Amino acid sequence: MVFFYRLAPLVLSILATAASFAIQKDSVRIFGDVHDSSGAVVSGATLDIKPDCKCSDCSDSKECKCCPPQVTVTTDSSGHYEVRIPAGNYTFQVRNTKVKVAVGSEDKNVNITVQ
């Protein structure tokens, strides 16, 4: 019984690490900064990241499980944002500025200048 209690934390640690790798494998870290047209950082900017996917693209268009959900993130006091999203094509939008981004299997830096 004592052996079980000593082994349990190790098993839980291994499972947590495996879960972490599984999450990282299916998503990519996207990060960057938002600036205005003068080059100043924009803190507190709301960035909408919408997948360029339609439910009709999925095998079951009623379920729409192949399209990832839209993600909204807010920049910090330095104008920086960071988010994990699945690979795919997205439209990044801050205010009236839209940027098309192809997200592959590698982390990507996407800086945006707001007009």
Image: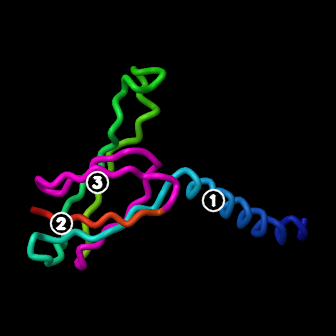
Q: Position of residue 80 (x, y in %)?
A: 29, 72
* Amino acid under disc 1: Phe
Q: Is mark 3 on a helix, strand or loop?
A: strand
Q: How far apart are marks 1 and 3 (CA)?
A: 24 Å
Q: How far apart are marks 2 and 1 (CA)?
A: 33 Å
Q: Which residue is drawn at 23% across and 78% down?
A: 77
Question: Which contiguous range is marked in magenta?
Answer: 77-106
Q: Residues within 10 Å of mark 1 (few under 14, many from 20)?
A: few
The tag earlier along the polypeptide, 2 or 1, is 1
Q: In which quarter of the image is the N terminus?
A: bottom right
| The disc label shown at residue 72, or none | 3
Q: Nearer the viewer, residue 88 or 66?
A: 88
Left or right? Give the position of 67 relative to 35: right
Q: How crowded is mark 2: few (under 14 residues within 10 Å), some or many (20 or more)?
A: some
Q: Distance between the residues labelled 3 and 2?
A: 17 Å
Residue tagged 1: 21
